[in-house]
Amino acid sequence: MWLERLELRHFRNYSQQDIEFNKGLNVFLGENAQGKTNILESIYFLALTRSHRTRTDRDLLQFQEKELSISGLLNRTNGKVPLDIHLTEKGRITKVNHLKQAKLSNYIGHMNVVLFAPEDLQLIKGAPALRRKFIDVELGQIKPIYLSDLTNYNHTLKQRNAYLKSTDKVDETFLSVLDQQLAEYGSRVIQHRIDFLKKLEEFGSRKVAEISGQREELRIDYLSSVSLTDSVNLVDDFLTELEKSRKRDLFKKNTGVGPHRDDIAFFINGMNAHYGSQGQHRSLVLSLKLAEIELMKEITREYPILLLDDVMSELDNSRQVKLLETITDKIQTFITTTSLDHLHQLPESLKIFHISKGTVKEDL
């Protein structure tokens, strides 16, 4: 798949901008704070209906504007697909082929993206929330039922926490009903994640071996706050943990176990990668991103779009070469950078766009 055209209206520092892209490599060149990352953010938002930089939609609105729109023309093997997102004071409207989509899971998945940004280099050593977000974004694009189960889980979790905060005398029967719902949705979320990580480990192992010259092996563990015996009894295991945690939950007025508390651990040659060198972290994250691309291709039958936000300067020559070898001619790629000097072995087929003060000009 590839994005042929993008139209922005009142998004960040862009009042009105229409851009036609190259099927292969597209480079956004400009000084900092001119709007390069905003372009990548708009593509990400068009794919996922969310920003990777903020949780607040109003941050995306151009100054003093009340509405924004992002439209794109996506090319897939089975034809062209127009995508539209319109953000108003009343909420958002998403359209596929000019038809409104009632559910998020009906929209997400039409356009798949893999983002590699400097903050991703914190994936190994950063907070667990970063790793949960990583798995939610990637899995949500390729498995719509995961998004549905996660949404239901989060809704039930919010209900349970609100109830715990609202009363000092808990109705045990009502709390048990909430626990049952939480366990059912949460167990599905956990199982989806475990299945996905097994596949990611399979693809990631190959990439880690390639980049390390066959010297390193990858293992990925899902660290659940629920003591898992087997997938058949996952709901029962979850309910058991909720029962164990009930006194704690009543005291702290929140829910202490569940996928919202879970984590992922990466191991290289049996050692937790958290304790590895900065170079190992960069190689591992690069391997995971390359593995995501291949995994999405296997599941969706199409390569995703790759967004590289000022990350090439963070990679040395050998890692750049490995990345560019993967994307050449196969994957539409967008790169933001302040200079072309550090970019090596770029393909001949590319478009360069100069970004200055919220204006995009193609290098002719």
Image (cartoon, rainbow, N blue to C red):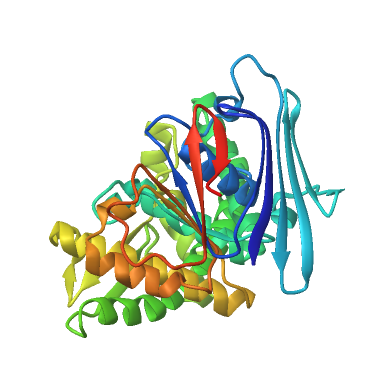
Q: Extreme top residue here?
A: 64
Q: Could you say where residue 189 lies in the image, as x and y percent from the top left?
A: 54, 61
Where is residue 124? Give x, y as percent: 27, 56
In front here: 219 or 249?
219
Q: Is residue 164 left or right of residue 299?
A: left
The residue under the point 54% across, 57% down is 186
Work out whether residue 228 can be spotted. no
Residue 58 visible in the displayed image = yes
Q: Is residue 44 above or below residue 305?
A: above
Q: Is 204 displayed left or right of 187 in the figure?
A: left
Quadrant of the rendering where the N terminus is positioned: bottom right
Residue 287 in picture, x, y percent from top left = 33, 70
Most extreme residue toward the right is 99
Q: Residue at (47%, 46%) from the top-left corner?
A: 28
Outermost residue toward the bottom in this view: 214
Name which quarter of the figure residue 255 lies in: top left
323 left or right of 137?
left
Taking the spot 26% from the left edge, 76% from the top edge, the residue there is 211
- Give 18 or 184, whichever is nearer the viewer: 18
Residue at (63% x, 74% y) in the render: 300
Q: Is residue 32 left or right of residue 87?
A: left
Mark count = 0
With respect to residue 50, does 204 lie above or below?
below
Q: Residue furthest front?
A: 364
Question: Residue 161, relative to residue 342: is it above or below?
Answer: above
Q: Percent x, y for residue 351?
A: 53, 55
